[in-house]
Amino acid sequence: MIVILRILYAAIFAVMIAVTAWAATQENILKIPPVVLNDAWFKATLFDAYFAFLSFYLWVCYREKTNLWRIFWFFAIVFLGNIAMSVYVLIALHRLKPGDGAAQLFARP
């Protein structure tokens, strides 16, 4: 299971880096047309994404022992989204001891 999770989150990281780099070469994020910003589904998607970020961040707060790391990961998740989230999970997976399973991944270290 852990190997599958490592592959999955490495793939998420790689795809998000690739898609973000591609998008950056196509259009300036600060020049998104107002028609897009005013679209109801665009707003709903943003709410959906940021509530998912908040849900993930609550797990980060549970796992992290210091407020400094909690603050760091808050800003990383808010600004980098799934890139930061995949890095966090990959770090957590890397820190598991041989033989640990998913239960240890979700527990406090």
Image: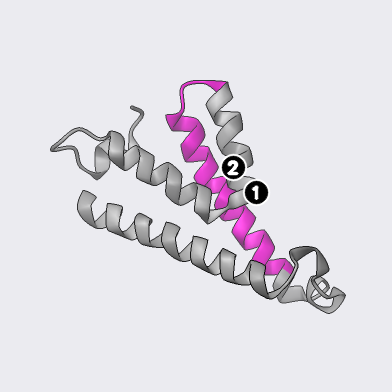
Along the line of sight, the residue nearer the viewer: 69 or 57: 69
**View extreme (bottom): residue:** 35
* Residue 104 visible in the current orientation: yes
How many dots with numbers?
Answer: 2
Pointer 1 residue: 79
* Residue in the picture at 76% in, 74% down: 40
Q: Quadrant of residue 21?
A: bottom right
Secondary structure under tag 2 reads: helix
In this view, 69 is above or below 40:
above
Pointer 2 residue: 76
Q: CA distance from mark 2 to mark 1?
A: 5 Å
* Residue 1 visible in the current orientation: no
* Mark 2 nearby-residue class (10 Å; few <14, some 14–19, many ≥20): some
Q: Residue 16: x percent and y percent? A: 50, 62
Q: Residue 45: x percent and y percent? A: 65, 67
Q: Which labelled disc corresponds to residue 36? A: none
* Residue in the picture at 82% in, 69% down: 31
Q: Residue 51: x percent and y percent? A: 61, 53
Q: Quadrant of residue 42?
A: bottom right
Residue 41 shown left or right of residue 5 in the figure: right
In this view, 40 is above or below 48:
below
